Each structure stands twice: as C-alpha cells, then as structure tokens.
Image: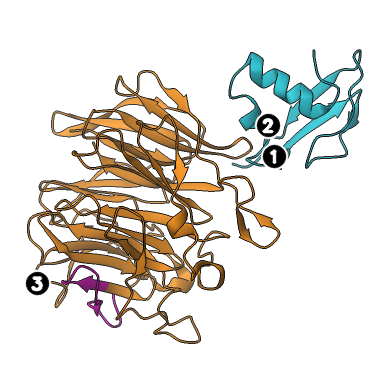
Amino acid sequence: MEGETVAGVVRTLDRRYPGLAAYLVDDRGALRKHVNIFVGGELVVDRERLTDPTGSEEEVFILQALSGG
Amino acid sequence: MQLLLSTRKGLIQLVPDGSGWRTLRVSFPGIPVSYAIRDPRDGRLWACLDHGHWGQKLHRSVDDGVTWQEVKVPTYPEGTEVKPGVPAVTRYVWVLQPGPADQPGRLYLGTEPGGLFRSDDGGDTWSLVTSLWNHPSRPTFWFGGGRDEAGVHSIVIDPRDSRKIQVGISCAGVFETCDEGATWNPKNKGLKASYLPDPNSEVGHDPHLLVACSSHPDVLWQQNHCGIFRSTDGASTWTDVGQPGGPAFFGFAIAADPLDPAVAWVVPAASDEQRVAPAGAMCVCRTCDGGATWQALRTGLPQQDAYDIVLRHALDLCGDYLVIGSTTGNVFVSSNRGDAWTGLGHHFPPVYAARFA
C-alpha cells in the first residue's frame, strides 16, 4: 500500500474506498476519538496529523472501539 | 401516510395497517439517527446519522428507504473556528429542511456547533452560510444548551417569499434573513432568558423549537427553555403564552396548526432541572385561542410512573393526526387532534424525531 505516513495510508484507502477516510478522521483530518491505528503493533503517536511513518512491510491495523448501550 | 421514527437504534418506517400501524422497514439498525424527513418535492428520504465513532453522516434514498446513498456531510471551511484555537467541525446534524417548491435542489441543514449549511444541487455539495456564522453576536452570545456548542435546530422558510427564512438556535435565539441569507438579524424581543444575567438580552435565548402557521406565516410559536412564546408579527415581538406553574410551560416540542393560527400543541415536561413527565403523567397540551388557555389531553397516555420526555423533533402533525415519540421508547398516535391517543409500541429505542411522511 502506498503512503509513507499513516495519513498517506488513509488517503490511499480513501481512493480505493471513496468516503472511508471520513469514517476514520474528522473534518480536520485528525483521528476520530474512538478510533485507534497501530503501526507495526504500536499505537500512533500523532493523532492530529497522522505523521507517524509506516514502513513498507509494516502492518497498519485500524481498531474501532465499540461501546455504549 | 407514513411515519418516520429517528431513534437511537436506527430509522423505523411505519405505515398504517388496518386500524393500527406496522413496521415497514428498519434502516441503519443500531446506528443513532438524529433526524429523518421526506422531501415533499421529489419524495426522497433523508437520514442524518450520528455514529458514535465514525462521526456524522448523511444518507438519501430515492426508493422509500429500500436502498440508501451516502452523501458527503457538510464540513466547515478550513480555518473556521468556533472560538480562537477551537476548529469548527460538524459535531451533530440537528435538522435537514427541504427548500421551497420554487427552488428545486435547495436544501438547508442545521448543525452543531451553530452552522447553517445550504445546498443547491440536491445535497451533492454544501456550503456554510457564512453571513450567519459571522454574525457579530456569535463569539460572545452563542453557546451550548444540552450539547457542548450552539445548534441550529429549526429552519422556517416563509411560504410567501423563499428569501425570508427564520432559524432557531440553541442557545442564541431566533435569527431572520429577508434577503436569502445575505444578512441576518436577531428576532428575540419579548423573550425571557431567565438563566442569563440580563434576561432581556438580544441574543442568548434558547428556543427549543421554532414553528410557524404555514397559512399565516407571521404567526410563529416557540417552545422555549423559559416558557412558550407566540408572535403574530413575523417574530418581531414575542408574547409569553405559557401557563405559569404549568403544565404547559417547559418542554421541547411544539406543533402549529397549518390552517388555524390560534391552535398549537406542546408536550410538557417537569421543569428544566428534572425533564420527566410532569408528576409521572404524560400529557399533551393544546391551545385553541392563541395560547390564552391550554387544555391538557391525557386520554390514552400513561398517567402514573411515566418518565417520558418528548424531544423537540418528536411531535408532528398531519391533518387531524398527531404523533409523539419519547426517550423512553413510547410512541403514541392521535387521529383526533390529540383528544385521544393510541400506543403504537412501548419498546422502541429512544426517539429523537418523529415525522409524518
């Protein structure tokens, strides 16, 4: 997958599945409150601009929290 | 006739079935739907979704809810701030209002944190009505009520002149444009904001819902946080028509008769501190004399151990039919203007909006 940062991965995903990015990030591009992204098993640090680097071999794992009643 | 229930767990469409109603279909199961409405111009259904994790979404259907198409939800222009350092993002979609018949494709959308959006292409694209957003009162006299930031929840278009629009904002008050949104003026004279240092402030009011009598558009009603108010001069001045001591005083919803400017309905709640059915008994209050007197209508509604409240968009009127849906999952319909009510179900999810369609 193209993208040297998490933001790039999200952009690539959005091109492949139009509208997907709006589910993961808010109007400003910041990660939504209850969504977590792991790169190589580690939580991303920059939730605001998603500048965490992604290696070409690393797994990017997107986790949605489920909560509420 | 059809009934759209926007609930915490999806959009429920009900249709008449013999002497009762049955569920036609459920769309968006499990997802909170803040508002849904049918556009009378083209029959499209619109649903505003409030995902817990994925943000606000907007969907439309051209086949009565069999299939839905997601439409990009409006976003605030880059750099727009609620206040210095706080970016404006679409936090909640309060209401979608189809435009008038002479403006096909025109739609309005009311949001938190206080932005009114407009579309002229049937919802494909949206733009913020910056003239209202940039009103000089917003930074200092608009604030959250119930939710964190101010919300545009009522959009009333004058049937005589599509350029004239009144919006209800909580908390800010009523604002009016007579030039299709180029300029806006507050219309809150006569309202009382008892929670403010100056109860007669020009802005800072909490009109829980603003409605108009469509055949007499200069007659407007609002169920306000601080009572029930009526205007007979196009919102230029407001008169307190609530019952001191209740039950017709505090509440969220109000419906105006489209033909008789003296008739309206409200669903009272006990005080702004409690927000439950007054004395554990649900009632709908109706006035037939412009708010001078109110009659409590209780037949068919629970009269003990009731904690129901009916939110601002969860009362609607269609001919002689009325519907109310409560946060306790009770839905009642009246076929005789509120004289008697029949329960459609008591195990619905919390109801955010109920609309005949």
What residue is drawn where x is 38% and y is 28%?
Answer: B60
Q: Quadrant of the C terminus of chain B?
A: top left
Q: Which chain is orange?
A: B
Neighbourhood count class around disc 3 (C-alpha, 10 Å): few under 14, some 14–19, many 20 upward: few
**Nearer mark to the viewer, of 3 and 1:** 1
Residue lying at 72% horizontally and 18% vertically, measured from the top left: A12
Q: Of helix, strand and loop, which one carries label 2?
A: helix
Q: Is residue B244 magenta?
A: yes
The residue that disc 2 covers is A24
Q: Which mark is residue A32?
A: 1
Magenta residues, as a range? B229-246
Residue to which mark 3 is pinned = B289
Is residue A21 shown to the viewer in this render?
Answer: yes
User: Could you say which is closer to the camera, residue B205 or residue B136?
Assistant: B136
Residue B337, given in percent of the width and then of the height, sits at 12, 53
Label 3 close to label 1 by CB (< 8 Å): no
| Element type where label 3 sits in the image | loop
Q: Tell me the shade of chain A.
A: cyan
